[in-house]
Amino acid sequence: MSEARYAIGVDLGTTNCALSYVDLAASEGESGQQHTLPVAQLTGPGAVEECSLLPSFLYLPHPDEMAPGDLVLPWGAQPDFIVGELARDRGAQTPIRLISSAKSWLCHAGVDRRAAILPAEAPEDVPHSSPLDASIRYLEHLRDAWNHDHPDAPLGEQELTLTIPASFDPAARELTAEAARATGYDRLTVLEEPQAALYSWIQSSEGAWREQVQVGDLILVVDVGGGTTDLSLIAVVEQDGNLELHRIAVGEHILLGGDNMDLALAHVIAGKLAAQGTQLDTWQIRALTHGCRAAKELLLVASDQDAVPLVVPSRGSRLIGGSIRTELTQEEVTATLVEGFFPQVEAGARPVSRPRTGLTQLGLPYAQDAAITRHLAAFLTRQIGATADLAGIGAPAANASFLHPTAILFNGGVFKSAMLVERIMDILNGWLTAEGAPAARRLEGADLDLAVARGAAYYGYVRRGGGVRIRGGTAQAYYVGVESALPAVPGIAPPVQALCVAPFGMEEGSATDLPPQEFGLVVGEPVRFRFFGSSVRRQDQVGTRLDQWTAEEIQELGEIELTLPADTRTPGEIVPVKLHAAVSEAGTLRLEAIPREGDERWQVEFDVRS
Amino acid sequence: MTQPRPSLAARISLAISVFWRIIIKPEFALGVFRLRQGAEVERAEPAAKPAALLQETGPAAALQLLGLLQRDGRFIDFIEEDVAGFSDTEIGAAARVVHEGCRKVMREHFTLESVRGEAEGARLTLEPGFDAASLRLTGNVVGDPPFNGTLTHKGWTATEIRLPKLAVGHDVNILAPAEVEL
């Protein structure tokens, strides 16, 4: 394979994808030559435009819906599906044929992510696709757009970095990597989005970042995308006289983002109109949501403005006679967004959770508490011990009830609003002041929409020795559930122990030692294990057994499955195996079963049909 | 009869003018057709008429822009509606939709700049040889340049146009398809 000419970063987002690249030959030191690929896509039937973002929407049109030739793309393909701007536009009017938020489905352990389950709740004769396939479609589109623009440097031969939420579990990470491999992205690395945002900040500072942070700094990255909120902590430490960055903790997966905010506002306005006797239909609600997004941005920037007029256009051609006029007031924005999503809470606040009803399996597990500040408080409190073993930082003061960040980097389009940025800064600094800690400062200068793709491309460049790297490894320790050998008690399930199979902070390309414990597996029969992860237990080593734990410490992930093929052994035979963990160069976790004798290895499946 | 070979620029300009004449003049097209067939060129034609100085502009781009203005800004709906019976408040409300959408279309597909950088109302002097295409003289237009005058409108120029590419065979006459909800 020929030498890569570009380092390419792909942000496969919940609502938008972007591709950024660095020309490796033209870059030196910490200044990479950065570009964003204008992605050619359908913006109307038969009309192709280049946009910097590719909306992550897949529309499956009815065979009679489009005229022949209306779906032709610049590279000659005429697929029977639509990706991008036109898909989003069409889907707004025909939601039963639209697949959106495929990425959120990809990390939903409650469904089979390879099964054609999307669009959820669509009638049966609508073609369906799996979360994995939808992700592949977006990656293929980006690949084709790239190859059309760079016929001499095909994407498969470049250094590729794909971003994922820091909170993705091993199964979702592996599925993302699988989607990339299926698209022919061979030289692949996965990178956590908050890290990518920080890389982008480092790059845009052109070397000056060393003056903006110092040893002992603890950077909190708050990344609120269209559909997810991602929190990470990155420590600045010193190693051999050089500044080093360590990603020390990541938050839980929170399905909550900017789209929820626009929708919340639209429902407030729709409620106001309903009180005046005007009922809006779903088409009008969507138009209203769109209007709210623009009005919100105006009000959040100019706090002296009391209200912004909002017009819900008529659906028919009578625009003047049929439109509904209303307004969005500063008060409504403050009450709904600022108080609803960023309420002033104490550092000891926790997200409110309601018991789930049995039907939530059908949809995405959206965050139950919309208050991002409560999620933030819970994250910082849970991670209070994250720096205890870190030279140069150490444990926080004895009176501290949460981990004290010293700097914040914001990412995501939501933070184009200075008011929301200030709100989070105020609340966090309030918590810090109450515990006698210095206020955190804001790191500025990253592009809120494209930082992740840019940072990813820059990372591909950094990996080749071009600049500072963030170290971190896996952000969780992983455990399998084993039944403890106790006498059976009728009616009581045997207690489960958690056996650590992969410790915290495993770096790319590393593997664990073999644990002492063996499992007897039956050849030819699939065996399932319960699988757990902990983002706080940093000390556990391979082989550590836990008898009890709190839900705060250890979370149950989806089940994992292992099948010993019967090709070399007799079915029914019991083989003693040990579980062995490794992190691939691409950054995905791999669990293998290794028998006591012989050099066979069997791969453990993370993504199990539920 | 020997003539110097025409330059590339001359050949391009010839090709364009010939293209239009083939389209417009069937007799001319017949002559070109015969020439391609290898027939003897008739030289009896009197000195060629000056190349056509007027051109048709292609309708595709205009229709495409109208379609975009309608899609994002409801432009045709607004213009086609009779405003006489509505109050200014009602028209104003609709105008917001039109303004926001049309502005988005303009920003996305054109880069516009002022022809003159001076503030409107500023005094300026036009030296001889100024570009009459980008400056329109009004009022007391007599004498020879340099002209002294006041800038009444700063003008607009499109420095970049980024219209969507269209699929071959796409019907641009449909500015907005009729919508049927099933």
Image (tube, coloured by chain):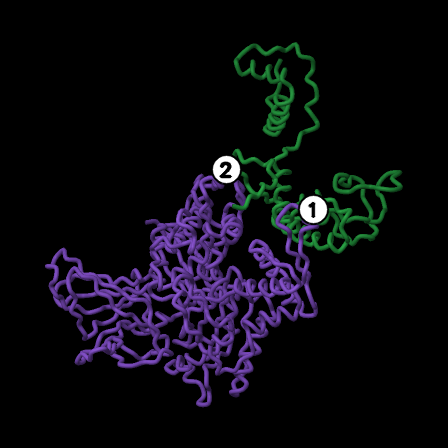
Co-location on one chain, circles 2 and 1: no
Check contact, mark 2 vs mark 1: CB within 8 A: no
Residue placed at 26% from the left, 73% from the top?
A481
Q: Colour of chain A?
A: purple
Q: Is residue A314 above or below residue A520?
A: above
Q: Position of residue A469 (x, y in %)?
A: 41, 67
Q: Is residue B48 above or below residue A64?
A: above
Mark 1 highlights which residue? B78
Q: Is residue A48 left or right of residue A560?
A: right
Question: Horizontal and vertical percent for residue A456?
Answer: 44, 60
Chain of the residue where label 2 is placed in the rendered structure = A
Question: In terms of image quadrants, where is residue A519?
Answer: bottom left
Task: Give the residue drawn at x 42%, y 72%.
Answer: A251
Task: Tell me if A295 is positioned left or right of B141 in this view.
Answer: left
- Which chain did the renderer colour green? B
Q: Local crowd at mark 1 within 10 Å, few (<14), some, or many (≥20)?
A: many
On the image, numbered disc 2 is attached to which residue?
A67
- Cα distance between the residues tagged 2 and 1: 27 Å
Residue A281, percent across and down?
Answer: 58, 55
Q: Which mark is residue A444?
A: none
The answer, for residue B72, to whether it is visible in the render is yes
Mark 2, residues whose alpha carbon is within 10 Å: few (<14), some, or many (≥20)?
Answer: few
The N terminus of chain B is located in which quarter? top right
Output the chain of dot 1: B
Judged from the image, the secondary structure of the residue bearing numbered disc 2 is loop
Q: For the residue labelled by badge 1, is the local secondary structure a helix, a strand or a loop? A: helix
Mark 2: amino acid: Ala
Disc 1 marks a residue whose amino acid type is Phe
